[in-house]
Amino acid sequence: MTDARESSRRLAEILRREHAALADFLLALADFDQRRLWVQLGYSGLFYFLHRELGLSKGAAYYRKVAAELVQRFPEVVEPLKDGRLCLTSVVQLARVITLHNRADVLPQFFHCSKREAKAVAAEISPAAVVPRREVVTKVATSVGKDVPRPAAVHLGEPDPTHPENGILHAPATQAPTTQTPAAPPLRRATAEPLTADLHRLHVTVSKQFLDKLEAARSGQSHAQPGASAEQVLETALDLLLAQRAKRRGAATKPQKNPRPSNPDRVSASLKREVWSRDQGRCQWALDGGGICGSTLRLEIDHVVPRGRGGPSTVANARLACKFHNQLAARQVYGDEWMDRFTRREGEGVPKDVPIAREPAAAWGGGGAPARARPRFTPPRRTAAGLQGVVFLVFTRASASPRPAGSRRRALRRPRARDGGAPGVGCGP
């Protein structure tokens, strides 16, 4: 822990110097641009000087050009850049909306914002004047060297003259001259571009099977949601998915007032519900510098005192932990040698023939090795010679009439020999 804390302090000092160096560079660049010294070097603008003379990429040159111009107009942005509150990637969005009148209120809204968050803040301050509400599908090339028609953009949700209720319209045959299809660009993750405070434009790459499923879902919802858009269909599907996930973690809109007693060795639905509500759906692993992990991904119920060491399944002994920290807690208790039999560490391949990790309920012995768990019942095998040592209890109804309310579901009858059958294997009357 001492080495980790010392390395952390060293990294923090290097980062502080990096922020200070960036602020000093932008101040010097602003002065360089204000005096138009790039003209004497033969360049037509500051961007070309940064890109060609200093060798910066076009993106890095553009960010620094915008930041230098912003520093000239609003010198108060230098201090947030120096201490790291304002990120260089947020400067472009800040420059779009900051003015002399709103700078005191707008500048703090961009502190500690990522590029995506800065776009959302800028869209909230200055929303788009006209927001188009349409769905567009563009075919992505997947091969090289084949003569195929040039793909056309497809607009979703626009009515077809012959089929006004149809949703997805596929690209019609085009008479455009065939061209050689370029290599497909690598697929990028979905991106959301904020337009206003409530509306975003989503860019996502999907397969043909996804479009077919979307059209099938739209058709299936045609009675409940006539003329539904892709957004409405997907939102309905997401509501169902979220409801299913909430049910798995024990969330219920109307929990039982008097729940039935459950196995104390298991995590009950009411316990899950209380732990998720108390921990607010975030990993509670404590950090060395203060605070918690706070991750919302791959969360699990973790026993503070493990069940294998006698820890009960109670709200006080349970917490939410992400999968990484849950396994880390187990490794701290049981050791890497034992846990490597059941789990793999981050970055390692999945080993073959990994046994299923079943934590024994008995107390753990010394040396990190678990005590022997109780043997499990193994049902007898069914052989060709017949069923040996197995007694089948056949449940039958006493009559075909409906059961009265509150009666037991089925009557258990003692098996007996009948019609010369083998003893112990019988059917009810």
Image (tube, grey):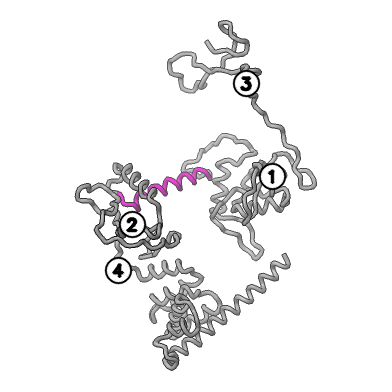
Q: Residue at x 60, y 75 (%)?
A: 15
Which residue in the structure is indicated by mark 4?
129
Q: Which mark is residue 137?
A: 2
Residue 248 shown left or right of residue 360 in the figure: left
Q: Residue at x 63, y 17 (%)?
A: 385
Q: Give the CA separation, mark 1 to mark 4.
A: 59 Å
Q: Nearer the viewer, mark 4 or mark 2?
A: 2
Vertical placement of residue 143 versus 246, above or below: below
Which residue in the structure is indicated by mark 1?
311
* Sequence-earlier tag: 1 or 4: 4
Q: Amino acid at mark 1?
A: Gly
Crowd around label 4: few <14 · some 14–19 · many ≥20 (10 Å): few
Q: Which mark is residue 321?
A: none
Name the spot of residue 301 as percent of width and height, x first.
60, 48
* Magenta region includes residue 244: yes
Q: Amino acid at mark 2?
A: Val
Q: Give the CA separation, mark 1 to mark 3.
A: 43 Å
Q: Give the CA separation, mark 2 to mark 3.
A: 59 Å
* Sequence-earlier tag: 2 or 1: 2
Name the spot of residue 167 as percent of width and height, x first.
29, 49
Q: Amino acid at mark 4?
A: Ala
* Sequence-earlier tag: 1 or 3: 1
Q: Nearer the viewer, mark 3 or mark 4?
A: 3
Q: Secondary structure at mark 4?
A: loop
* Sequence-earlier tag: 3 or 4: 4
* Sequence-earlier tag: 4 or 2: 4
* Sequence-earlier tag: 2 or 3: 2
Displayed quadrant of residue 308 = top right
**Residue that lies at the very extreme toward the right in this rendered image:** 366
| Between 90 and 216, the one nearer to me in the picture | 216
Q: Give the CA separation, mark 4 to mark 2.
A: 24 Å
